[in-house]
Image (spheres, rainbow, N blue to C red):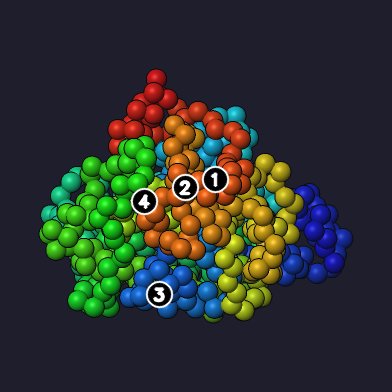
Amino acid sequence: MINRRNFILGGAGVLAASAAYKFDWLTELKKEYPNVLMLIVDDLNDWIGPLGGHPNTKTPNIDRLAAQGTVFTNAHAPAPLCGPSRASIMTGLAPSATGIYGHVRDNDIKSANDKAAQSIFLSEYFKQHGYHTAGVGKIFHQRVADGSFDVYGGRVKGFGPYPEKRFKWHDKRTNTDWGPFPEKDEQMPDYDSAQWLANQLKQQHDKPFFMVGGFLRPHVPWMVPKKWFDLHPVETLTLPPYLKNDLDDVPDIAKRVTELPMMPTTEWALENGEWRNMVQGYLASVSFVDACIGTVLDALEASDYANNTAVVLWGDHGYQIGEKSKFAKMALWETATRTPLIIKPPKSSSAKVSDRPVSLLDLYPTLVKMCGLPANPANQGNDITPLITNPNAPWQHAALTTYGPNNHAVKTERYRYIRYEDGSEELYDHQNDQQEWQNLAGDVDYQEVIASLKAHLPQENEKWSAVSYYEGNAYFKQLSDKASK
């Protein structure tokens, strides 16, 4: 039969194989090399059924996928912001290695620094090793980098559709708003993306495929058709845990890094009676995108590729829905960094759960290993396929999230340790404080714990790249402006 080396070496090996054997070698390749279907959900926190992040969540299709694969309950983003998180995942390099700490234009990623210039995007790597690559929607920060996919189905600009006038929140510096709009699912870009993916799965592909769909909701505005709001009656909803003086024991830099003057606060939401409506808007948006995911999963199950396709679902970071008085991502606390990660291997239908700490940076080496391709030595993440096989396998790694130069969060199964560029620290014991309400960094009894967690901090902290930008608050605007001069 055709060997892996011929496939991996590309066209020359394929031609040799086709001449040497009297059968359809492409069919044999499709049998030997699994397809990959990767679904990305923008701003999706742990409010999905498999993670139990909210009691009123309704995500039957994500639940269905979770019942067939491994759910990573302790997965975290490389950065708590779309641009740097997605750039990290697609290059296989940490933000501290590329200097991409803020947003970045898709085509500028490889201009960030020398390491970024030498990187091979995840989709490119599969393409170079014989795969057909196809994508739609928001995959990188904007769309996709030029040439990174064989076929790209496009993305509507922005996060609309938008009503003529804002409903509740009128600060034009943010898309944040909430309420039922528009009338029909067919008016939503995510509906179109789901249909595009379904049509791709109906087609006959002459090579294994690497297919990616980037969905926009639940990114703000939390606006989807009314039927999704009706699925979550506002009077029945549970509000997230909230402590008014939550930030009294965090260092000053933590407040500066997370200051978001354009966003509502929980105090505002309470005073104006909007918190439940905001929770409803987020839950409705999650249920809507879950239905879009269901369309794609149905198409896969009805296709010729159902039994040889790895399915991966992830969000690009977490999102705070009132915790720590924030309605945003952009922080190094649990609710801003934790995000879903579900991996269903090809030919797998068994549900598994792993509590080991993993990073979305681990996706690149994991998918490469799962598909039998040679490892990319530049990857900085860890191969987590051992945890897919055995969710409780020994694991010495921690999940690292970076938000600006020398600002890092280290997450293990029990602890979250945050260290800022000025040396300030936070430490939370999730065994006793899942809400991260008590900062233990100054407690003498935890200094050995802190010392052990420091070992996971990155040794390199590249300067802010000139191609990266973020003006969400004064702290980051100053860094961004300085780098661009």
Which mark, residue 447? Answer: 1
Local secondary structure at mark 3:
loop
Marks 4 and 3 sit apart, C-alpha to C-alpha, by 21 Å
Q: Position of residue 370 (x, y in %)?
A: 69, 62
**Quick one: which residue is furthest to the right in this view?**
20
Q: Position of residue 473 (x, y in %)?
A: 30, 37
Q: Residue at x 44, y 37 (%)?
A: 424
Local secondary structure at mark 1:
helix
Which mark, residue 443? Answer: 2
Which mark, residue 329? Answer: 4
Residue 48: image quadrant is bottom left
Local secondary structure at mark 4:
loop
Tell which tag, 2 or 4, sits nearer the viewer: 2
Residues at discs 3 and 1 in contact (Cβ within 8 Å): no
Marks 3 and 2 sit apart, C-alpha to C-alpha, by 41 Å
Marks 2 and 4 sit apart, C-alpha to C-alpha, by 28 Å
User: Tag 2 or tag 3, which sits nearer the N-term?
Assistant: 3
Residue 73 to residue 327: above or below: below
Q: Residue at x 29, y 61 (%)?
A: 242
Give the camera-side residue of 377 and 201: 377
